Image: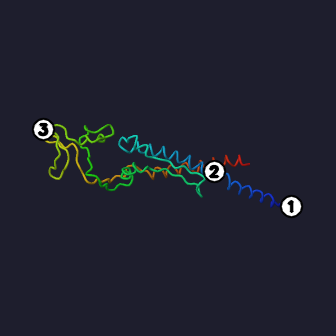
Amino acid sequence: MLKINKRDTLKLLKKDLKRFERKALPNATIESINQTLEVVKKGEIHEMKTKLHKPTSFTLKGLHMFAANKKTKYPIGRVFIKTLQEKYLQYQIDGGVSVSQKGKWPIPIDKSITNTFGNLPRGKKRLQPKKNDFFAKIGDTEGIWRRSSTGLKLLIVLKQTRQYTKKIFDFYGRGKRIIDVHFNKRMNINAGRRQKIFK
């Protein structure tokens, strides 16, 4: 009769696995999370460039990455939108109604008065009527109008609220798809590499 007894081998293997889980695996996890988040951030910036109308550099810089580290009990990292940019990007992500807290929203109707990003120029003078322009409420429409030989032309409409029905910036969906594709691949690579070093 042949008898195989690998009790001592199994004990050593379990001990090595515990050491690996305690020392190498957390580092591999943190590394994989941060590598994946870098891809998520790049993907979200691409999403903004393709889905939003000429986003400004200020908008694109609104994405921030909080890297995973050893300070937390469990490795965790995140990509988020900074507070100032989130105030207006949330409506592109979730839709909804934006209510102006200071006066009314100036919404350009005449594209000839907008900048390269499709917005009104910054500064106090942007709403000051020029020659042949005037503030008025005509019918139900309040805004800045222009007199011309062909009649009146609406330049800017003023509204207390803005309705966003389309969710054009798929922030959560894009991020989840990238995580689903990239994290496990990086985890396998990093864990395998650290296991070789550990041995």
Relative to 187, 42 lies left or right: left
Question: Which tag, 2 or 1, sits closer to the chain's start?
Answer: 1
Residue nearer the viewer, 182 or 89: 89
Disc nearest the viewer among 2 and 1:
2
- Residue found 30% across the figure and 54% down from its top: 101
Q: CA distance from mark 2 to mark 1?
A: 43 Å
CA neighbours of label 3 inside 10 A, class few (<14), some (14 to 19), many (20+): few
Graded by Cα atoms within 10 Å as few (under 14), some (14 to 19) or many (20 or more), the crowding at tag 2 reads some
Which amino acid lies under the numbered mark 3 shown in the image of this protein? Answer: Thr
Q: Indicate left or right for 85 with 4 as reference.
A: left
**For marks 1 and 3 on the same chain, the one whose residue lies earlier in the sequence:** 1
Which residue in the structure is indicated by mark 1? 2
Q: Secondary structure at mark 3?
A: loop
x and y percentages locating residue 70 in the rendered image: 61, 53
Where is residue 75? Give x, y as percent: 58, 54
Kind of residue indicated by mark 2: Asn
The residue under label 3 is: 150
Q: Report the residue marked by disc 2.
A: 27
Q: Secondary structure at mark 1?
A: loop
What scheme was used to colour the molecule? rainbow
Quadrant the N terminus occupies: bottom right
Pick whichever of labels 3 and 2 is earlier in the sequence.
2
Q: Is residue 65 left or right of residue 119?
A: right
Sort mark 1 into few (<14), some (14-19) or many (20+) by Cα contacts within 10 Å.
few
